[in-house]
Image (spheres, rainbow, N blue to C red):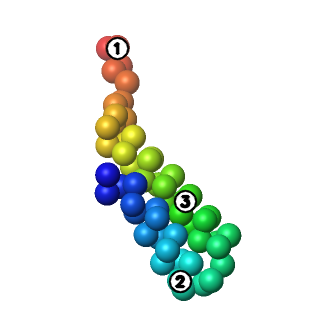
Amino acid sequence: MGGALVPLAFWLLTLRGSRRPGLAALVAVGVAALGIWALISWWAPHQAPETAG
């Protein structure tokens, strides 16, 4: 549940600092994308293929 609030927090902080809603939305989308990527990487880590030999 907390992960869903992180992009919102970054959006609010960016909006407060720059007063540009487009930039704040871009930052929030980027943070959400990084969070989803991190969750997927954690859930299903990369496994090297087995070599026949």
Number of numbered discs on residues = 3
The residue shown at (56%, 78%) is 15
Give x and y (percent) for residue 2.
31, 57
Give 49 or 17, whichever is nearer the viewer: 17
Q: Which residue is mark 1?
A: 52
Label 2 CA crowd tier, 10 Å (few <14, some 14–19, many 20+): few
Give me the C-alpha separation between circle 3 and circle 2: 17 Å
The residue shown at (43%, 69%) is 9
Give 38 or 51, whichever is nearer the viewer: 38
Residue lying at the far top of the rendered structure: 52
Location of residue 39 (image quadrant): top left
Q: Is residue 13 above or below residue 7?
A: below
Q: Which residue is mark 3?
A: 30
Q: Secondary structure at mark 1?
A: loop
> Which is nearer the N-term, disc 3 or disc 2?
2
Q: Which residue is mark 2?
A: 16
